[in-house]
Amino acid sequence: MNTGSATDRLQALGLDLPSLRSNPYYVDQRTLGSSIYISGQLPYKGGELLGQGIVGQDVELETARELARHAALNALAAAVQAVGDLDRVRIVQMLVFVASTPAFGLQSRVADAASELLIEVLGENGRHARTAIGVAGLPLNSPVEIQMVCTAV
C-alpha cells in the first residue's frame, strides 16, 4: 500500500484534503523552524460538522472513529498549508480529545482510527507519539477534536 506519493495513497483511499475555513481569532497552523503546530481540528467536511454529542451516550464508537479520521484529515490539510506538499509532512505528536461519558474508557480506540489514517497515508512519517483524553465537552458539541505537532521533512 505504501507505494507512490502520500497524495496518491490518500486518493487511493477515496479521500482528498479539505479546504479549511479561516477564523478571525486563530490560525490553523503556525510554524517555528521546521516544527508545525496544528490548532485543534474538528470533524468538518464541506463546511459542516459531521457529528455532535457525547461518545458512549449519543455517539457510537464506530461513528466516533470515523469522525476522528475526518478531524485528522483536516489536521493534515493544515500541515500542508505550512509546507505545501503532503510528502513533506511528518507527524510528531497527536492529541485526541474525545467528548465521552465518564464510563466510556475507549478513547484510545477512537484515536486509533486517526492514527491508522495517518500511517496509511504517510507511511513511517505518519507514526507518532499520541495521547487520547476523555473530556466533558468540546466546541460546538463535537464528539472529537485533534491537535497535532508535525515537522517538515
Image (cartoon, rainbow, N blue to C red):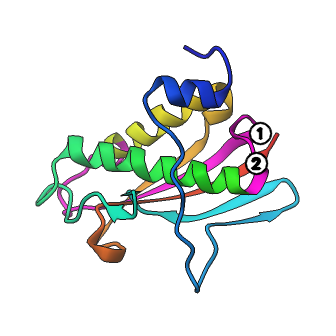
Task: Report the magenta residues as a range.
Answer: 82-108
User: Residue reaching furthest right?
Assistant: 33
Q: Nearer the viewer, residue 104 or 120?
A: 120
Q: Residue 65: percent from the left, percent from the top?
A: 31, 43
The 10 Å Cα crowd at callout 2, few under 14, some 14 to 19, many 20 or more, is: few
Residue 144: mark in rendering: none
User: Helix, strand, or loop for circle 1?
Assistant: helix
User: What residue sits 27% from the left and 49% below the top?
Assistant: 64
Q: Nearer the viewer, residue 56 or 64?
A: 64
Q: Which mark is residue 84?
A: 2
Q: Is residue 99 one of those drawn in magenta?
A: yes
- Which amino acid, by three-letter code, is at mark 1? Arg
Q: Residues within 10 Å of mark 1 (few under 14, many from 20)?
A: some
Q: Residue at x 49, y 48 (%)?
A: 72
Q: Are marks 1 and 2 in contact (CB under 8 Å)?
A: yes
The quadrant the N terminus occupies is top right
- State which quadrant residue 96 falls in: bottom left
Q: How far separated are the C-alphas under marks 1 and 2?
A: 8 Å
The residue where tag 1 is placed is 88
- The three-letter code of the residue at mark 2 reads Gly
